[in-house]
């Protein structure tokens, strides 16, 4: 099982710090932002830190090919406003991934802000065509969205349309998010059917990352509010079936669940996932551990 969580990538500790945090949760992969997701502030990649980090990964049997970077939220390829900025900043994020040796970059497709879904899809594809070239070694993983507001990508068909319009479509993959899919109307309690639908539309081999999150919302409410594993409307057993699905065995699973009183839940959630046993005292156990 390839499972991890969202960790911090700090200026002073870089990739080494991210690895050490992930190891403290007993995980064997992780995801991070190379800078704040809401702004353009970015510290230079420390190449010496990165070299040492690669050795640390090897020492702990973590495959760098399973690590994931998440692109910042401020990139909105669906809206032509600030087009040059969006394309330039995404190119910069790809370059930073390449310097770190990471191949998977998760990207929210964007919001069309009233321009219409078809226009949004065309704008995303046009932007990706300007971003990607033959030398790009990073896979852009378009994330399935909840359908909040004017988000593009809440239906598999929309992601398929984007990919079909990209010239170098082999460099565009998908990150499925359980909370987002639930909120978009996909029944995670019947995940095999959802996976079959995805396979028929896009192809299951194009799933390069899975975000594992419970949801605070009922199915098809388009709200996008994550919940801790087993504490939401999807439920522990249903999420376990996603995590242990044989068809996704080699795909990194990443927890993005909420902190509990400002404490990370990942160590405990990964433990209950590995034990296949729901921890009814999860919240209290987290609070007591970090006291």
Image (cartoon, rainbow, N blue to C red):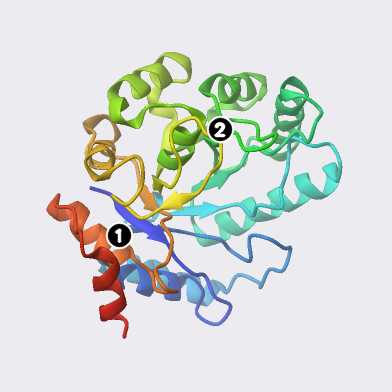
Asked whether the viewer can see residue 61, the reply is no
**Where is residue 76 shown, x and y percent of the image?**
73, 43
**Where is residue 172 shown, x and y percent of the image?**
56, 32
Badge 1 element = loop
**Badge 2 density bin: few <14, some 14–19, many ≥20, Cα 10 Å:** many
- The image's mark for residue 202 is none
Residue sitting at x 40%, y 17%: 197
Residue beneath disc 1: 62
Identity of the residue furthest to the top in this view: 200
State the residue in front, 157 or 40: 157
Marks counted in the figure total: 2
Identity of the residue furthest to the bottom in this view: 291
Whether 129 is drawn above or below 9: the answer is: above
State the residue in front, 47 or 85: 85
45 lies left or right of 118: left
Residue beneath disc 2: 172
Residue sitting at x 49%, y 69%: 8
Badge 2 element = strand
Q: Quadrant of the C terminus?
A: bottom left
Residue 249, located in which quarter of the rendered image?
top left
Q: Earlier in the sequence, mark 2 or mark 1?
A: 1
**Where is residue 152 shown, x and y percent of the image?**
65, 31
Residue 17, located in which quarter of the rendered image?
bottom left
Residue sitting at x 25%, y 58%: 270
State the residue in front, 267 or 52: 267
Alpha carbon separation for disc pair 2 and 1: 24 Å
State the residue in front, 201 or 100: 201
Residue sitting at x 38%, y 51%: 254
Whether 93 is drawn above or below 285: the answer is: above
Asked whether the viewer can see residue 211, the reply is yes
Whether 216 is drawn above or below 123: the answer is: below
50 lies left or right of 55: right
């Amino acid at each position: 099982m390839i499972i991890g969580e969202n960790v911090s990538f700090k200026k002073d500790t870089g990739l080494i710090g991210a690895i050490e945090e992930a190891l403290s949760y007993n995980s064997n992969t992780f995801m991070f932002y190379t800078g704040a997701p809401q702004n353009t502030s970015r510290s230079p990649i420390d190449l010496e830190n990165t070299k040492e980090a690669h050795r640390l990964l090897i020492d702990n049997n973590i495959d760098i090919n399973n690590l994931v970077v998440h692109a910042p939220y401020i990139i909105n390829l669906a809206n032509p406003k600030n087009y040059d900025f969006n394309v330039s900043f995404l190119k910069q994020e790809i370059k930073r991934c390449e310097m770190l040796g990471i191949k998977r970059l998760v990207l929210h497709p964007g919001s069309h802000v009233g321009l219409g879904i078809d226009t949004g899809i065309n704008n995303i594809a046009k932007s990706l065509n300007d971003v990607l070239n033959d030398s790009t070694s990073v896979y852009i993983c378009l994330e399935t969205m909840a359908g909040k507001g004017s988000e593009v990508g809440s239906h598999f068909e929309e992601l398929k349309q984007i990919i079909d319009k990209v010239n170098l479509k082999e460099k565009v993959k998908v990150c499925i998010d359980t909370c987002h899919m639930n909120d978009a109307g996909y029944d995670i309690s019947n995940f095999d059917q959802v996976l079959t639908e995805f396979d028929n539309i896009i192809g299951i081999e194009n799933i390069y990352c899975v975000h594992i999150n419970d949801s605070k919302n009922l199915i098809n409410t388009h709200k996008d509010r994550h919940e801790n594993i087993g504490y939401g409307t999807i439920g522990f057993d249903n999420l376990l079936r996603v995590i242990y699905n044989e068809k996704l065995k080699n795909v990194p699973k990443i927890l993005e669940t909420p902190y509990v009183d400002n404490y990370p839940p990942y160590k405990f959630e990964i433990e209950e996932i590995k034990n296949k046993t729901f921890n009814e005292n999860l919240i209290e156990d987290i609070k007591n551990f970090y006291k």
